[in-house]
Image (cartoon, grey):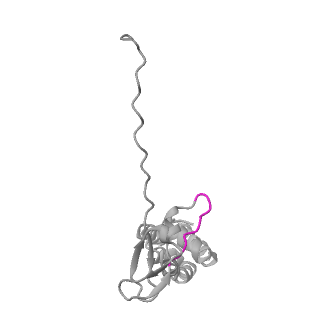
Amino acid sequence: MKGNSLSATPPPPPIHEIPAPNMHVDCPYCQVRLSVHPSQAGSAAGCPKCGGRFQLPIPTALPLGRSQLSAYSSTSEIQRFASKKITAGICGILLGGFGVHKFILGFGKAGAIMLTVWLAGIVLSILILPLFASAAMWIIGLIEGIIYLTKSDEDFYQAYAVEKKEWF
């Protein structure tokens, strides 16, 4: 049949599996950062630098809405960032208007905004208005300091290291 309008459609292109990203773990003995495939999670590993043997962590599922980046974060990485929690919390409570707690967490832009608003509030209060802007920065710092101190280490790491949440 020469005039047949039916023609064979080409097969669909093959589906390629996207490889899982490597997870990063720190050797508990020498703190060297290792990159391993997630399929090795839960198995024993040896550090190529110090030769120490340890078990690789198993990534955990995260609640909906959480970034999957932290599923592969090592416990020592979480603890290293969470060590800033108490310092940032206390600075937020005591020095809130200056934005010091923002600088401690690496949020320079947010810290600069708080410091600028606080300074502008002081200058304007001398010339025109009461201390509303400066008081607002102190209240924001106080609230954020309390929030930092009441979060678990994992939630603190997720919110401020992974999601980079700068405000409240």
Where residue 70 appears, x then y in whole percent? 51, 68
- The residue sitting at 43% across, 63% down in the picture is 21
In the image shown, does 119 or 88 lie closer to the viewer? Answer: 88
Query: Is residue 64 covered in magenta?
Result: yes
- In this rendering, position of residue 61 left or right of residue 28: right
Q: How many marks?
A: 0
On screen, residue 17 above or below 32: above
* Along the line of sight, the residue nearer the viewer: 62 or 105: 62
Residue 165 position in % (x across, y down): 51, 65
Q: In the image, is residue 66 above or below residue 43?
A: above
Q: Is residue 5 above or below residue 119?
A: above
Residue 90 in the image, given as x and y percentages of width and height: 56, 83
Tell me the quarter of the image containing the N terminus.
Answer: top left
Residue, x 42% and y 70% (percent of image)? 112
Task: Name the chief secondary structure element in magenta.
Answer: loop
Q: Nearer the viewer, residue 80 or 22?
A: 22
| Residue 145 in sight from this viewpoint | no
Query: Which segment did they paint magenta?
Result: 56-65
* Residue 27 seen in this snapshot: yes
